[in-house]
C-alpha cells in the first residue's frame, strides 16, 4: 500500500511541476493551434520511438537506464524502501520505461493540453491495479498450475513488445484526434 501511495504522490509532483513549468515558460500563451500541432507531432514522434524500440527489442530510449538502488533494502525498513521506490517510479522520468505513452501524457501536460492533476489519474491507473494484484496474489503453487504463480516483473516484461505496440497505437490515435481538432477549428 505504501508503494502505491508513494507512486501516486510522485506522479502528482511530476505532472504538477511539468504543468507549472509550461505555464511559467508561457507555453499556455501560444495559440491553441500551435500547442495542439506540437502535441500531435510529439505524440507521433513518440509512437515512432515505440515502433523503433519494438523492432530493436529494447525499452523506450527516452528513459533513464536506472532503477531505485537495491542497496536501500540493506539500510532501511521495508516501509521506507517501498515509499522511496514508489515515489521514484511515480516520477515517471527517473526510471526505465517500457513504452513512450507516459512521455505523451507528460508532453500534453507541459503544453497545457492536459491539467496538472493528470498525475493523479496516471498514479491511480498504476497503483490501484498494482495494489489489487498484491492483495490477490497467492504465493506458491495453485491447484491448476504445476509452477509457482508469479505476477512479478519478469512476466510483465515478457509482454514488452505488445505493450509497446499498444502504446504506439494509442499515441497515433491521440495524434490523429489532435489533428482533427485543428482541422475542425
Image (spheres, helix red, strand yellow):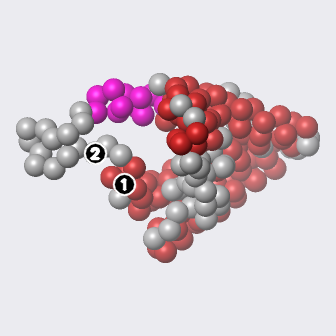
* Position of residue 115 measured from the top left corner of the image (x, y, whole percent): 71, 31
The residue wearing badge 1 is: 154
* Position of residue 61 measured from the top left corner of the image (x, y, whole percent): 61, 65
- Determine contact: label 1, label 2, CB under 8 Å: yes
Tell me the CA gap for discs 1 and 2: 8 Å
Residue at point 66%, 49% (across, down):
93
Q: Is residue 154 visible?
A: yes
Q: Which mark is residue 125?
A: none
Counting other residues with Cα less than 10 Å from the Cα at mark 1, is it few (<14), some (14-19), or many (20 or more)? few
Question: Is 33 colored magenta in this rendering?
Answer: no
Q: Nearer the viewer, residue 103 or 72?
A: 72
The residue wearing badge 2 is: 150
* Position of residue 38 measured from the top left corner of the image (x, y, whole percent): 76, 53
Regarding mark 1 in the picture, which secondary structure is present there? helix
Placement of 5 over or under 185, stated as above or below? above
- Magenta span: 127-137
Question: Is 128 colored magenta in this rendering?
Answer: yes
Report the label total: 2
Residue at point 20%, 46% (across, down):
148
The dominant secondary structure in magenta is: helix
Q: Quadrant of the C terminus?
A: top right
* Position of residue 37 measured from the top left corner of the image (x, y, whole percent): 74, 52
Locate residue 159: give its quadrant.
Answer: bottom left
Amino acid at each position: 500500500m505504501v508503494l502505491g501511495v508513494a507512486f501516486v504522490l510522485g506522479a502528482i509532483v511530476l505532472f504538477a511541476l511539468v504543468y507549472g513549468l509550461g505555464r511559467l515558460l508561457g507555453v499556455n500563451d501560444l495559440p491553441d493551434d500551435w500547442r495542439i500541432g506540437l502535441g500531435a507531432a510529439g505524440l507521433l514522434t513518440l509512437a515512432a520511438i515505440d515502433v523503433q524500440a519494438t523492432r530493436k527489442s529494447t525499452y523506450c530510449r527516452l528513459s533513464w537506464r536506472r532503477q531505485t538502488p537495491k542497496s536501500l533494502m540493506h539500510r532501511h525498513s521495508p516501509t521506507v524502501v517501498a515509499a522511496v521506490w514508489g515515489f521514484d517510479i511515480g516520477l515517471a522520468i527517473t526510471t526505465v520505461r517500457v513504452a513512450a505513452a507516459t512521455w505523451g501524457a507528460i508532453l500534453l501536460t507541459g503544453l497545457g493540453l492536459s491539467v496538472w492533476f493528470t498525475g493523479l489519474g496516471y498514479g491511480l491507473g498504476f497503483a490501484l491495479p498494482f495494489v489489487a494484484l498484491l492483495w490477490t496474489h497467492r504465493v506458491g503453487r495453485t491447484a491448476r498450475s504445476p509452477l509457482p504463480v508469479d505476477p512479478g516483473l519478469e512476466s510483465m516484461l515478457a509482454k514488452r513488445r505488445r505493450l509497446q505496440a499498444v502504446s504506439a497505437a494509442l499515441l497515433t490515435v491521440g495524434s490523429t484526434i489532435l489533428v482533427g481538432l485543428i482541422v475542425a477549428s
